[in-house]
Structure formats: C-alpha cells, structure tokens
Image: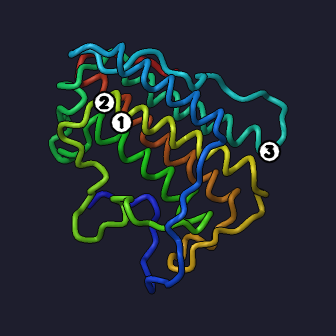
Amino acid sequence: MWVRAFNAKKAVVGGGDLDSVHRLKPEASERLRRAAKTRCDAAGAQVAFGPMTIPRVRPPLVADERTQLLGWLDMQRAIIQWKCEGLSDEDAHRPVLPASPLMTMAGLVSHMRWTEHCWFEVLFLGHSSAGNPQFDETVEDADMLVEGVPLARLLDEYERQCAVSNEIVAANSLDGVGKHPDFRSAGATLRWMLIHMVEETARHAGHADVIRELLDGQKGYY
C-alpha cells in the first residue's frame, strides 16, 4: 500500500460548514490562469508541457527561516516540473516500476498536487477534505488514478496548488497550529508541515529522477 501523505486517521466527521476553499488574490489568480492556458494551448499532441515557472534555484545561504523553508520547497517542486519537460502523454502515463504500477510520472504529479492541498488547505486551514482523493478510504491510492488526464493539465493544477500553499504560508505564523478537528496530524505547527513537505517533495523528486531515466534516459540533479 502506498503510504498516504497525511498519515492521519479520520476520527469523527465534524459538523459545520467546512466547504469554503482558499482563493488566490484576483490578480494572482488571473495571472496563473493565463499562464496555464498558454502552456496548454502551446502543448502539441506529443509534448505535454513547456517551460516551468517555479524557479529551480536554491534559497540564499543566509536568510530568515520562512524564506529558507519555502525556498527549499519551491526548488523541489521545480525539480518535479523539470523532470516532466518534453515528456509525451504516453510516456507520462507509462509505468516503469513493476511493483508500483501507479507510480507513473502523471500519477506522481497528481499525488503531489493533492498532498499540497491536504497539508495546507485541509489540515492547516481546516477546510473540507471533500474532493481530495487522498481522503477516499474506498479506493487505494486514488490520487494517482489519472489515466487519460493530460500531463499538462496535471502540472498546471500542481503549480496552482503550490501558489495557494505559498499564500497560506505567507499569511500565517510558522508557530500556528492546524485547525481541522478530525485529523490528528492537524495538531502540527505550520513549521512542521513545511519541513514535512520539503521531505515529501524531495522524496518524490527522487522518484521522478528514476522514472524519467527509465522512460527515456534523461537524467540530471537540478
């Protein structure tokens, strides 16, 4: 069984209205929509994704804690994007790890998008888990079931989710504690969640290294 990112056992489905979702500022939202449309329109039948927009750079050697944590997280996110550049939709959905058939590049990107949503929107902000397949207890690894979904769409959704995560981090104290009443992991601080997301994303960036090399021989660190 794939280890779920949130590592939390549902207790009681709480009452109250948890259906509101975090929204980007209007100007940021519109900018991201334009960027996503441009990349999707430019994508041909084979090449699924164009240039990434998250910079693939390390954070400054000397900086405040928030800058360093987000800097390292953004770099790992960018590596995942980079490993998808020039990859066909066929290859993006092709399994290459015999014991992990759902661990395709497309499945990995989808998993990371929903992991961002899980930790920052659901567990930290306390929003509803409805719609996030990681919380579907009836289907194992549902967040990786993306057959037929173009890689370009998955990458755009991942990048938009990362932008939402960064806005949440920017607006809250690192000492703040998650608000969802139904999951034990919501008791972590935002700092803990950020460190975990660096670990989680870096781990899967390593998986992306292996998958891409097995798909077409392309390799590289960052």
Picture coordinates of residue 125 (x, y %)?
62, 64
The vertical placement of 10 against 149, above or below, is below
What is the three-letter code of the residue carrying label 1? Leu
Q: Secondary structure at mark 3?
A: helix
Q: Residues within 10 Å of mark 3 (few under 14, many from 20)?
A: few
Q: Quadrant of residue 149?
A: top left
Q: Secondary structure at mark 2?
A: helix
Q: Earlier in the sequence, mark 2 or mark 3?
A: 3
- Which residue is depicted at the point 46% across and 15% down? 51
Q: Secondary structure at mark 1?
A: helix
User: Which residue is tagged 2?
Assistant: 151
**Front: mark 3 or 1:** 1
What is the three-letter code of the residue carrying label 3? Glu
Q: CA distance from mark 1 to mark 2?
A: 5 Å
For residue 152, side relative to residue 77 (left or right) = left
For residue 143, side relative to residue 10 (left or right) = left
User: Which residue is tagged 3?
Assistant: 65
Contact flag, marks 1 and 2 (Cβ < 8 Å): yes
User: Which residue is tagged 1?
Assistant: 154
